[in-house]
Every structure is written in structure tokens, then in C-alpha cells.
Amino acid sequence: MVNFEEQFCTKRSINFYGRSISFVDVTPPMLISNIPIIIAPGWGETPKTFKDLIHLLFDAGFRVVSMTHPRQDLKLITRSNISRLESQKAEIILTVLKFLGIEKVNVVAHSEGAINSVIAAHMKPTLFKNILLVGPGGLVENENFTELAGRFIGNMIQGGGQIFTDSVARKYIIRSGLETFKYFLMNPVMGLLEGSAISRTHLQDFLVDLHSNNITIGVIHGVDDIVFPLKKMKSLTELKWISFYSVEGDHSDIYDHSEKYITFIQKRFTDN
């Protein structure tokens, strides 16, 4: 069996409407679950952002798949009023799953990744079993782009402070910062459009539909998350069938301190 590093660095891709979509697919020698995990990256994130989390899940016995979304708006026609950009990312998730022959999947979705993965599950609910939303976008009430942009900037400042105070987080913050910079620089206009889409999307009705299709939903929220704080999702907390988990940390904590999340994920995806 090929080791983690070789699998993670192996370039794999599919053709999606004339664009090459790269993805990561790692499988450990012994599986703890037959259901793979999709890591759905948020805005400015790629599989490299989550390399340590993916490695930990691999070591725990999970097959993990994650993809890099293209920096082009392919202007695909959608049949609903959801963002075209988020719908495009949802279709990419479904296309990768189909290409790999995966018939059932669990999801860990971070930030904006919550939006496109929930849309994907709404489009094809039979493929999805459990969804864990980590610091999820698309659920803050009375959101607008200016407020969201301000909170993202605040998160960058918050993370910048950790470079000087947290030696463990330093290398992860630098890595994720480089990925975000490359992500935005490749198409700044699209980056702003994505931010606008995040602020205009509200997923709660979709979550109700997923629950009716027997998909379990969990939310992990950082107590210091200023980008998508739980206190701004009051109606979400009234849905008693959603499991909520609190962790010490900010919006970027899942890739700064990935080890804190393994217990949540492993328990959720092996008990259900």
C-alpha cells in the first residue's frame, strides 16, 4: 500500500466542462469505515490547507477525498435561485464522487465549504450519510457582504497575532495564508463574487430537507470564531436534531490544531 505522502502528492484530476479539476484521494491500509470522508474546503482553501487533518484521518483509518475548485466561473445554468458559483462547486463534488464510484459519503465541511457541500447533498441526498459543518458559512442571519468582509479581515488579524504567540500554529497559518493568497490572486473578481455569494446564501431550509432524507447534521463551532459565530445563528440552534460541539479556537483552528477535531469526526462517523 502506498504511504500517505505519496498518495497525497499524486496528481489526480477529472475533466469538468473543459476544465481540469484536481483532487486528493488517500486510502489507509486498514479502514475503520467503508464510507469515505469528503473534506470540503472553504473560501481560499485547498486540500493542502487541510493536509494535517487529512493525514490524521488517514492514520485513524479513513479514506479521505478533497478537491481544489477552479478559479473560473464556468457560468453553468442552474435550476434554482442558489448562487451559480456555489452550485458549480456542488456539481464538482458530485462529479468527483461519481468518477471515483463512491456510493455513500460522510462530509467535513469548513466555512464556505458548508454551502457547496449542503447544496451537493440537496441535489443528490442518497449519496450522503453524515455532514459535519465546521464554522459554517451560509447560516448567519441578516448577513451582508460588508459585515462578512469585516469579520474575515478580523480573522486575518486574529491569526496574524498567533504567528508571534503560538509556535505550533505558526507553520499552519503561514501555509494556509499562502494558499489563500494564491487562491485570490488567480481571479480576484471571482474571489469577491464568492464572498458576495456566501453573504447572500442561507442554508437552513436545505438542512431541514436533508434531515427529512435521514442525513445527520452536526455543527462544530469555535468559541473564538468571529467569522461565523454561533450567536449569529440563533434559529439554527432551535433545530433539536442538529448536534452541536464547541471547541476552544478560532475560525482557522481546524487546520491550525487539527488534532482537536479527530475525536469529534471519528465518533460521528463510526457510531452512525
Image (spheres, rainbow, N blue to C red):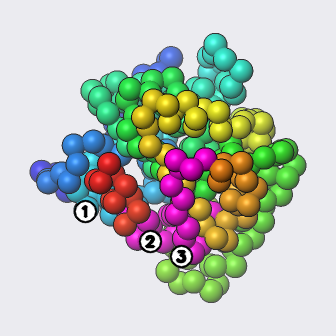
Magenta span contains residue 240: yes
Q: CA distance from mark 3 to mark 1?
A: 21 Å
Could you tell me which residue is drawn at 65 percent across and 53 percent down? 237
Q: Position of residue 83 (x, y in %)?
A: 69, 27
- Bin the neighbour count of mark 2 within 10 Å (Cα to Cα): few under 14, some 14-19, many 20 and up: some
Height in image: 85 above or below 9?
Answer: above
The residue shown at (71%, 72%) is 158
As drawn, the label of residue 260 is 2
Say which quarter of the image contains residue 228: bottom right
> Whole-Å distance between the Cαs marked 1 and 2?
15 Å
The magenta region covers 239-262
Q: Position of residue 178 (x, y in %)?
A: 59, 59
Q: Which residue is mark 3?
A: 169
Which label's residue is closer to the chain start, 3 or 1? 1
Asked if residue 230 is positioned above or below residue 66 in the image, the reply reads below
Label 3 amino acid? Ala
Q: Is residue 172 left or right of residue 80?
A: left
**Which image quarter: residue 263?**
bottom left
> Which residue sits furthest right?
146
Q: Which residue is mark 1?
A: 59
Tell me if 178 is positioned left or right of 33 in this view.
Answer: right
Give whichever of discs 1 and 2 has the lower sequence position: 1
